[in-house]
Image (spheres, rainbow, N blue to C red):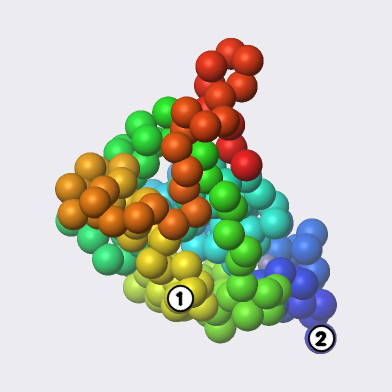
Amino acid sequence: MTEPCPECGAAVGGSTGCAAAFEELGLRRFSDLRYAKWNRLMVDAYSLQHPAEYMRSAKSFAAHLTGTAAALERPDQSGFVNEAMVRWLSTNPILVRPAEPAAGRRGAVTIADVLSAADPAVAIPEWARSAWQAWSGLHAIAREWIAIATHDRAAVRRPLPNLTSVDSARDKFGRGRYV
Ligand SMILES: [Zn+2]
């Protein structure tokens, strides 16, 4: 039996095999245009299942979590949401990185399923939905971050979880710091 990836559980030959599988899947967009459209969601789904490597900082954590949320919950606006997130994160808001779901509990669908699937337009969203569901404890903060980034006025009136004023922790260059 092929050794499972300790992070996502895919039987692809451990961490090394999983990293190679991710690279292979990423390269498919150059040979098969059907994959190109799903590249962002593919990266976000893989990140949710490998957060120690791809979501180490609060900034990357927020980007991949909200990228998945945007694609699955607001597909018609995902470009707008992702651009707003990039702009907001570039202002260096103080974010506390939340804890992620434990390894092996990040969704039953893995990259192994996507690699062998016939249609990326079905397989990649299924993979992302599986990972997103496993992260259900973080859905509220993902939506809150999106609301802040897109200046949803209703959200801004609510208290901001895991977020403090950027002015309270400027470094010597006057930039806000990530925690
Ligand atoms: Zn893996």
Seen at 31% across and 43% down, the residue is: 149
Decide if residue 96 is on the left or right side of residue 126.
Answer: right
| Labelled disc at residue 145 | none
The residue lying toward the viewer, choosing from 149 and 32, is: 149
Q: Report the amino acid beneath label 1.
A: Ser
Residue picked out by circle 1 = 136
The residue lying toward the viewer, choosing from 77 and 94, is: 94
Residue 146: horizontal and vertical position, in percent?
A: 32, 51
- For numbered disc 2, what is the local secondary structure? loop
Residue picked out by circle 2 = 1
**Quadrant in the picture for the C terminus:** top right
The residue lying toward the viewer, choosing from 107 and 120, is: 107
**Quarter of the image holding residue 118?**
bottom left
**Quadrant in the picture for the N terminus:** bottom right
- Does residue 39 sit above or below 92 in this rendering? below
Whether residue 2 is visible: yes
Query: For ligand 1, which image quadrant applies?
Result: bottom right
The residue lying toward the viewer, choosing from 133 and 153, is: 153
- Tell me if mark 2 has few (under 14), some (14-19) or many (20+) residues whose alpha carbon lies within 10 angstroms of its own: few
Query: Which-is-in-front pick, marks 2 and 1?
Result: 1
Residue 101: horizontal and vertical position, in percent?
A: 61, 73
**Quarter of the image holding residue 121?**
bottom left
